[in-house]
Image (cartoon, rainbow, N blue to C red):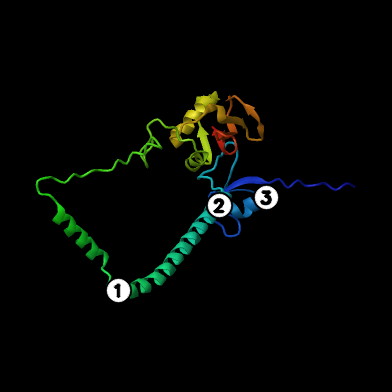
Amino acid sequence: MKQRRSVNKLVEVQLLKTLPGIGVEGQILHVKPGYMRNYLHIDNKACYITPNNPPRIPVVDVEDLRLQEQRKRKQLQQKKQEENVQEEETDKLEPAEQAKEEANGAMTLEELSDLFSSMKSSKRVPDKPDLKVQSNIFDATKEMIPGLEVEGHEFDSVQDIDNKLPKLLTLSNSALPINKKTLAKHIEELTERNIDIGKLNLSYIDTPEDHIDSITETGRFQVRLKSDDEKTSITRVLEVE
């Protein structure tokens, strides 16, 4: 007799609590139905994710968290190295400067400043007022004031949009059909950045390579936004409910 093969289908769930060795709060996992039913579903540790039940809390991308943690560690290490180098240079210079000043009877910076001020005041002609010239902070080579953005200047940075755009986008089915123009306006409201419709692609979640012009039904879709040079892109999930 032929033995029946059992298909162990995984289910998509979202962790509602951080569980050591399993995942962090907000992470999306694919687990066995029995594991979800007998362990994760108890005490509200996780919830099922279906087309009718989107994630309850903001989705957390573990890979993004790892990259952010790595960047923070590198910045801290670099900062500590710079501080150590500065301390070593200061420790070397201070004794040498003090010894030189004591041997030569050198004047301090405050004494030199007072001396120059008295010399200028003695040469000053009382009949002529001093002219105070303020340097212009406008840089003619850059054609803009440093630190300020020109009004109307388009900020072209996919990374900046990626930081501000949620992992899961949601729109109501009352907005159907949803085209690229409608979606671009929704992203602009969330990120406060201008979106080029030509760099925006729509597709079904299971066929990301087949682009579509508009969405005419509820469900989950993939949204991809490319940079101007098309070398980098960001991807988001759109839930139409």
Quadrant into which the C terminus falls? top right
The residue under label 1 is 104
Local crowd size for mark 3, using a 10 Å CA cut-off: few (<14), some (14–19), many (≥20)? some
- Which mark identifies residue 67? 2
Q: Residue at x 56, y 30 (%)?
A: 199
Q: Nearer the viewer, mark 2 or mark 3?
A: 2
Q: Residue at x 60, y 56 (%)?
A: 22
Q: Residue furthest right?
A: 1
SS at mark 3?
A: loop
Real-space CA distance between mark 1 and mark 3, rounded to the nearest whole angstrom: 82 Å
The residue under label 3 is 32
Could you tell me the amino acid type at mark 2? Leu
Residue 140: x percent and y percent?
37, 36
Q: How many marks?
A: 3
Local crowd size for mark 2, using a 10 Å CA cut-off: few (<14), some (14–19), many (≥20)? few
Residue 222: x percent and y percent?
60, 34
- Which mark identifies residue 216? none
